[in-house]
Image (tube, rainbow, N blue to C red):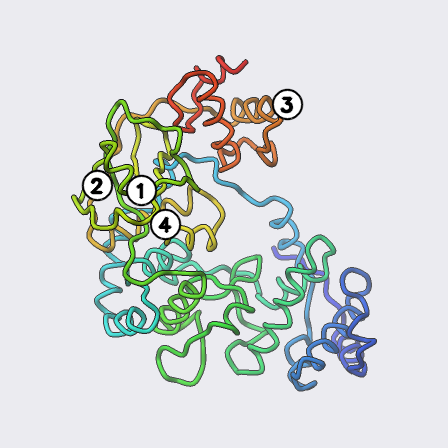
Amino acid sequence: MRHTLSIPLAAAALSLAVAASPAAAQQAQCGGDLGAFLAGVKAEAVADGIPADVADRALAGAQIDPKVLKMDRAQGVFRQTFLEFSQRTVSQARLNIGLQKMKQFADVFARAKQEYGVPAGVITAFWAMETDFGAVQGSFNTRNALVTLAHDCRRPELFRPQLIALIKMVQHGDLDPQTNTGAWAGEVGQVQMLPKDIVAFGEDGDGDGHVRLKESGPDAIMTAAKFIAHLGWKAGEPWLQEVSIPDNLPLEQSGLDSTMTAGDWFKLGVKPRDGNTSFGNLRGDLLLPQGRKGPAFIAYPNFAVYLEWNKSFIYTTSAAYFATRFEGAPKYDVGNPEPGLDGTAMKQLQEKLDSMGYDVGEVDGILGSGTRDAVRKEQIRLGLPADGWPTPAFLAALK
């Protein structure tokens, strides 16, 4: 059963009638009485040019949702390996549906590529991974989720602007505040975007005069393309390419943010599985998500867009790989990776690395970029292959 803490409708109406003065806009930036907080939000919205009656309609009946706070306090993280996560998400069923969607909306995808330079497979992979092509968009009331997170004093600077943007979506007729549902953190629609980004980059793909990312596939496709282009996508360039690596490859420059080009790696014996070496002049990062004995990829500059979309290395590498599959690449070579560390051992590793002066971020049992980089440096120091993949043998050697 869902439990919410709401303010009476009469009190809400009274609070929303507060004059929209600059002083009121500075009141109750977070926390405190919900009615006073909403009055401040209304004042800020009106100061931003939104009619008062629209703000009233958007905020009337707003509630604090404890389930949103619970989700915010207990966010899940990627404890799965790349092989585990990618094999679960990049399924044949999703590939089949995605290819059907690419055919169904071929004209929209062609327009997206022409206007923004983003291939159909890139958009389709995000569409699949975010909501299963719109099938799973979230069941939280979007307005209430953003009210809850903006009122909460943990990250109001992030969520209060999103709440103002949601009111703008109500003004444009693109969202019903009473009925619209989405993710617990306020993301909306088939490609799960926050209101500020929808207001800034929303595209009316189906020509009905509205940007409705929940219901409209064309709107979702065109909006995603415009947003991806904004993140820095370079038309005509690759993003990820599967490769094979020789046994004696020097791995000190592997990982993100290397100074190598793809051509430098090719000269060292790295071979693209598709045989295409035409992008050798581009910077190329050698990614070994499960070490030198597992799948291997060259990540090109466009891969940075994936990291802007989601900071998780496992998610981004899986999404980028998924996109290559939609564009015709074969399934990766699983290889024979060495067993990694479980969550407890990973925390022990992070604690050890932290005590040695490395910045691994939070000790959370997750093999993130900071931990990978520290592992690589210690592998070099210990004379081990510097692939960034920690094994039980490495942890024992480190201790």
Bin the neighbour count of mark 3 within 10 Å (Cα to Cα): few under 14, some 14-19, many 20 and up. Answer: few
Q: CA distance from mark 1 to mark 4?
A: 14 Å
Counting residues from the N terminus, which is met first, the one under dot 3 or under dot 1?
1
Q: In the rendered structure, find residue 272 and report the number of the disc placed on it.
A: 2
Residue that badge 3 annotates: 355
Callout 4 amino acid? Ala
Q: CA distance from mark 3 to mark 1?
A: 32 Å
Furthest toward the left, the residue is 275
Callout 3 amino acid? Ser
| Nearest-to-viewer mark from 4 and 2 | 2
Counting residues from the N terminus, which is met first, the one under dot 3 or under dot 2?
2
Where does the image place residue 274, in percent across and percent down from the top left? 17, 44
Q: Residue at x 21, y 66 (%)?
A: 103
Dots 2 and 1: beta carbons under 8 Å?
yes
Callout 1 amino acid? Ile
Residue that badge 4 annotates: 319
Q: In the rendered structure, find residue 298 and report the number of the disc placed on it.
A: 1
Dots 4 and 3: beta carbons under 8 Å?
no
Counting residues from the N terminus, which is met first, the one under dot 1 or under dot 4?
1
Q: CA distance from mark 3 to mark 2?
A: 39 Å
| Nearest-to-viewer mark from 4 and 3 | 3
- Left or right? Give the position of 399 relative to 327: right
Q: Compared to 129, does 342 lie above or below?
A: above
The C terminus: image quadrant: top right
- Left or right? Give the position of 207 relative to 379: left
The N terminus: image quadrant: bottom right
Dots 1 and 4: beta carbons under 8 Å?
no
Callout 2 amino acid? Pro
Counting residues from the N terminus, which is met first, the one under dot 4 or under dot 3?
4
Q: CA distance from mark 2 to mark 1?
A: 8 Å
